[in-house]
Amino acid sequence: MSIKKVYISADIEGMEGVVSSHQTSRKGHDFNIARKRLAEDVNAAIQACLDFGAKEIVVCDAHADMENIILEDLHPKAQLISGAMRSSLQMQMIEEGFDAVIIFGHAGAGQSFNGVIDHTYNGRKIYNIRMNGITMNTEAILNAVIAGHYNAPLIAVVGDQALAEEVNSFIPETETIIVKKGLSRFSALSIHPTKARELIYDGVKKALEKTDKIKPFKLTEPITMEIDFKDSNMAEVAALIPGVTRPEPRTISYTGDSKTIFDLQELIIFRLVDRL
């Protein structure tokens, strides 16, 4: 299969060596180490795509304020999306047509035992997200739904063992590249970054070779999205949006077409709830 355009969404929590806010927060002592390591890990995936024949690679900075990857650290043949004021949480521009998607991610909130820094978009606010009645707390899977709507398959994920198991429970064909094993929510057994980049390169190449066997992950429309918040006031505010209902004190629900659901995710999870 010819692969010309590849989309890479890069979050930081799933990387080798990342186990706490020391690495994930801009105020953390080791943040600058982690952000550079993220760029180098992503570069390994980019190089694999280029060697496979890809002509265009777009990297979406998908962590926190979404200004983590330093442009000079990124492979010069890739383009970078950065900045948090956007219309999609972690999949900006995916609608422009891509042959394959690669995600650097982490386990979903409460989805697995020993998922390192497990959360769903906003760990302080979001408890559960359900799509058509199925709990989908893994961001990589929620992002795969968005990509699938635009006919782009999730071919590979990079992260911890919990992420790998969560993704394969939904998309068994997706190549999972495991760079650490969680021992608790804030501890892990990690491989060396040099070894991680070798695994990432080989894993992405393997994924690209079987892309034609991985179908885009699609949900049947109309889609019903339900969000359980940590606190009831969040649901109270979100329910002010026309069409959004509040079946439980901490829960909101909306049924509609895919594009509206994706827009509501951005509006509620980032623009609205993050300010409460």
Image (tube, helix red, strand yellow):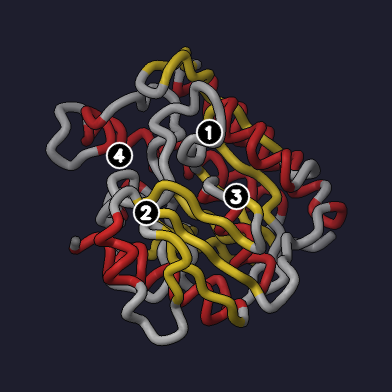
Q: Nearer the viewer, residue 271 or 147?
A: 271
In space, the residues marked 4 and 1 are separated at their CA atoms by: 15 Å
In space, the residues marked 1 and 2 are separated at their CA atoms by: 25 Å
**Residue type for callout 1:** Gly
Q: Nearer the viewer, residue 214 or 149?
A: 149
- Circle 1 sits in a helix, a strand or a loop, which is it? strand
Q: Is residue 95 left or right of residue 152?
A: left
**Residue type for callout 2:** Phe
The quarter in which the N terminus is drawn is bottom right
Q: Residues within 10 Å of mark 2 (few under 14, many from 20)?
A: many
Nearest to N terminus: mark 3 or mark 4: 4
Marks 3,2: beta carbons within 8 A:
no
**Residue 210 drawn at (x, y percent):** 83, 48
Label at residue 35: 4
Q: Nearer the viewer, residue 96 or 127?
A: 127
In space, the residues marked 3 and 1 are separated at their CA atoms by: 20 Å
Label at residue 159: 1
In space, the residues marked 3 and 4 are separated at their CA atoms by: 30 Å
The quarter in which the C terminus is drawn is bottom left
Identify the residue at image location x=64%, y=37%.
166
Nearest to N terminus: mark 3 or mark 2: 3
Marks 3,4: beta carbons within 8 A:
no
**Residue 110 drawn at (x, y percent):** 49, 35
Label at residue 229: 2
Nearest to N terminus: mark 1 or mark 2: 1
**Residue type for callout 3:** Thr
Nearest to N terminus: mark 4 or mark 1: 4
